[in-house]
Image (cartoon, rainbow, N blue to C red):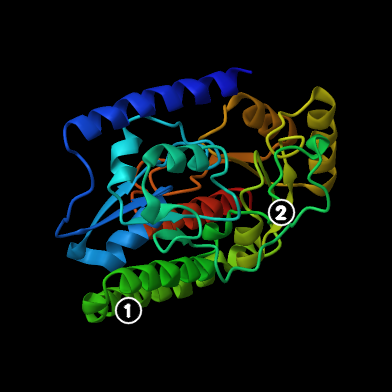
Amino acid sequence: MKSKLNLKLFRLFSAILFAGMLCMGAMPAYAAKIRVVTTLTDLADFARAVGGDLVEVNSLATGVEDTHGVPMKPSFVPIMNRADLMILEGFECEHAFLPALLEASKNPRIQRDRSGYVDCAKGIVPRDVPKSTEHYAGDVHPYGNPHYMLDPILAKTAITNIYNALVSFSPPYQAEFTRNRDAYLAKLNAKIVEWQEEAKTLKGVKFVSYHEHWPYFAARFGLDYFGTIELRPGIDPTPRHIEELVTAMKAEHVPIVVREPQFPEKVPKRIAEQTGATLITLPIMPGGVPHTETYIKMMDYIIHTMVAAVQGKK
């Protein structure tokens, strides 16, 4: 009931703001730069890398939010109203906030199935497509787990989708977009080699996390994703679930508990203390913790922190 009330209030505020824009003549006008809005900060980083000086990029998220529930702000409406491209993670990751924002934006260019609506999941084979989407299963994603960006190989598909959207929107600048993309991919590919070498010590290491953010990451770097603290996606753990998880972790000697900064520390900390595991906090998008402002810095942080935690257990 509360979420429905918040949505109604958001739509009311947005309507008032949009009416004010009309009165002031603040309708979309030609701008020298391509106006890009992204849902999440990793996408913003990629758009800036590929677009260079030709783009103006705004991210709805700052990095500290839940990717599924970025708070809707009326200030987003004029930004999206003027946008040329709306770039999203896809697999319905943003289903809780993006549809209402698109409706409020009154911008035909960026609506679903229009050329300005850029779904970066295009070309990604999803993991964990649910057999059931019934309510009891939690806040499941009917198209599969959307957290593919934590696999840097799959992140290159998102970069390609962003590149294609920019070229389609502004063909005269294709050569510049191509140079920018190639330069960034060269840097990213070098880091991937580095990460894969460093992550050799993570092969087979078991870990749990609060939310199911990590299946793509675990598959890429050879970790054993043991389970989640959440009972099911979006459903807080029960005392019985915590007790069963602790027992299983002790039996299997699970050494790592990952807490994403969007979730309180209390329960992950208690589980780590009861099992003797090391508790680490890892971001799920750039800006989630200090010194992770870019995608590469974020992945550096994740790999380094994971490796340090494992080595500390030896």
Mark 1 near mark 2, Cβ–Cβ under 8 Å? no
- For the residue marked with disc 2, what is the amino acid? Tyr
Which of the pair 38/235 is nearer the observer?
A: 38
In the displayed structure, does residue 8 sit left or right of residue 23? right
Q: Is residue 215 left or right of residue 21?
A: right
Residue 72 lies left or right of residue 22; in this view the side is: right
In the rendered image, which quarter contains the N terminus? Answer: top right
**Residue located 34% across and 73% down the image:** 168
Quarter-wise, where is residue 127 in the image? bottom right
Q: From the viewer's side, name the closer residue of 10 and 195.
A: 10
Front-most of 56 and 157?
Answer: 56
Above or below for 90 versus 107: below
Place of residue 115 in the rendered image (x, y in percent of width and height, measured from the top left): 41, 64
Q: Residue 25: image x %, image y %?
A: 17, 37
Vertical position of residue 207 compared to residue 245: above or below: below
The residue singled out by tag 2 in the image is 225
Could you say where residue 158 lies in the image, as x and y percent from the top left?
47, 66
Please tell me in which quadrant of the rendered image residue 175 appears: bottom left
Given the image, on which type of amino acid does mark 1 rest?
Asp
Q: Secondary structure at mark 2?
A: strand
Q: Is residue 23 left or right of residue 70?
A: left
Residue 215 in sight from this viewpoint? yes
Disc 1 marks which residue? 182
Q: Residues within 10 Å of mark 2 (few under 14, many from 20)?
A: many
Closer to the chain start, of discs 1 and 2, is: 1
Q: Residue 269 has which mark?
A: none
Q: What's the residue at 49%, 62% (across, down)? A: 120
Camera-nearest label, 1 or 2: 1
CA–CA distance in space, label 1 to label 2: 33 Å
Residue at 59%, 68% in the rendered image: 124
